[in-house]
Image (cartoon, rainbow, N blue to C red):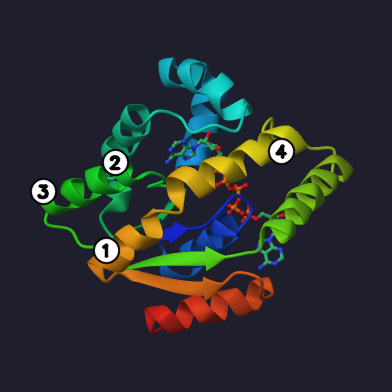
């Protein structure tokens, strides 16, 4: 199974991707996690990405497309994968389409989680509070200024992907305002399992 989870920051992509990993035994490819790992490891990609990510902006298409292209050919992706946070721009979606076509692969679904902006801000604030309470490290982009920029980037660059995938007939929409368990049920219904 090959899926894309689309949605604004805080929509629940990571939450639902983890559940799908447990259910279907396929891998979660979160470009955000991959980039954060690259930043932590101080790789060339990480050095280029850090300031851009901290400011809530999107990392360049070339970098992210390269990261995904290298990752989806690894052995653990043979059974399928969930793309969480990729694609995020129309050029990324076009690159993915040609990547998959060249490998004879098809997507099973593109699932968009729809959540009101006010709720997204509250979720980010709760995540910060919970992380702090647990003594963890708050994400450098989970602050009001960067989050506002992340929402703007989403509106301007990622929201057009709904039209892109509506055009390919692969788009399915889920009400991401529902409780987490209910969102999982809606996704399972779409996937027919
Ligand atoms: P990334 O790591 O992808 O972050 P994001 O898209 O901003 O999303 P989040 O991880 O904040 O939210 P989520 O949708 O996964 O929600 P979650 O499940 O955590 O990207 C970070 C940065 O990396 C980007 O800004 C960019 O710089 C760079 N980047 C990454 N990919 C890129 C790309 N393709 N191109 C260019 N740059 C890229 O849930 C959030 C919270 O809400 C949690 O606390 C959760 O418990 C709660 N929650 C979840 N679902 C529900 C629910 N239904 N009801 C109530 N609470 C809920």
Label pair 2/4, CB-CB below 8 angstroms:
no
Q: On the picture, is 152 further left or further right than 26?
A: right
In this rendering, which labeled residue sits more in front, label 1 or label 4?
Answer: 4
Mark 1 vs mark 2: which is more N-terminal?
2
Q: Which residue is mark 3?
A: 102
Mark 2 vs mark 3: which is more N-terminal?
2
Where is residue 149 drawn, in percent x and y? Answer: 62, 36
Q: In the picture shown, does residue 86 fall above or below 46? A: below
Q: Residue at x 62, y 64 (%)?
A: 115
Distance Cα–Cα, label 2 vs label 3: 17 Å
Distance Cα–Cα, label 1 vs label 2: 17 Å
Q: Residue at x 36, y 69 (%)?
A: 171
Where is residue 69 drawn, in percent x and y? Answer: 26, 38
Q: On the picture, is 2 further left or further right than 11?
A: left
Q: Which residue is mark 1?
A: 107
Mark 1 vs mark 4: which is more N-terminal?
1
In depth, the one of 54 and 1 nearer the eye is: 54
Where is residue 73 drawn, in percent x and y? Answer: 24, 43
Mark 3 vs mark 4: which is more N-terminal?
3
């Amino acid at each position: 199974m090959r899926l894309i989870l689309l949605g604004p920051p805080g929509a629940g992509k990571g939450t639902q991707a983890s559940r799908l990993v447990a259910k279907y035994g396929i891998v979660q490819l979160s470009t955000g996690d991959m980039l954060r790992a690259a930043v932590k490891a101080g790789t060339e990609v990480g050095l280029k990405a850090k300031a851009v990510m901290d400011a809530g902006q999107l990392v360049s298409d070339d970098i992210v497309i390269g990261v995904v292209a290298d990752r989806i050919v690894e052995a653990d992706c043979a059974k399928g994968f969930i793309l969480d946070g990729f694609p995020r721009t129309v050029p990324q979606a076009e690159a993915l389409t040609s990547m998959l076509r060249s490998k004879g692969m098809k997507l099973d679904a593109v699932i968009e989680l729809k959540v009101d902006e006010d709720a997204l801000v509250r979720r980010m604030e709760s995540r910060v509070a919970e992380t702090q309470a647990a003594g963890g490290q708050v994400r450098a982009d989970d602050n009001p200024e960067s989050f506002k920029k992340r929402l703007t980037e989403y509106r301007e660059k990622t929201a057009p992907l709904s039209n892109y995938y509506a055009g390919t007939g692969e788009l399915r929409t889920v009400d991401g305002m529902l409780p987490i368990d209910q969102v999982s049920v809606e996704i399972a219904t779409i996937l027919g399992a």
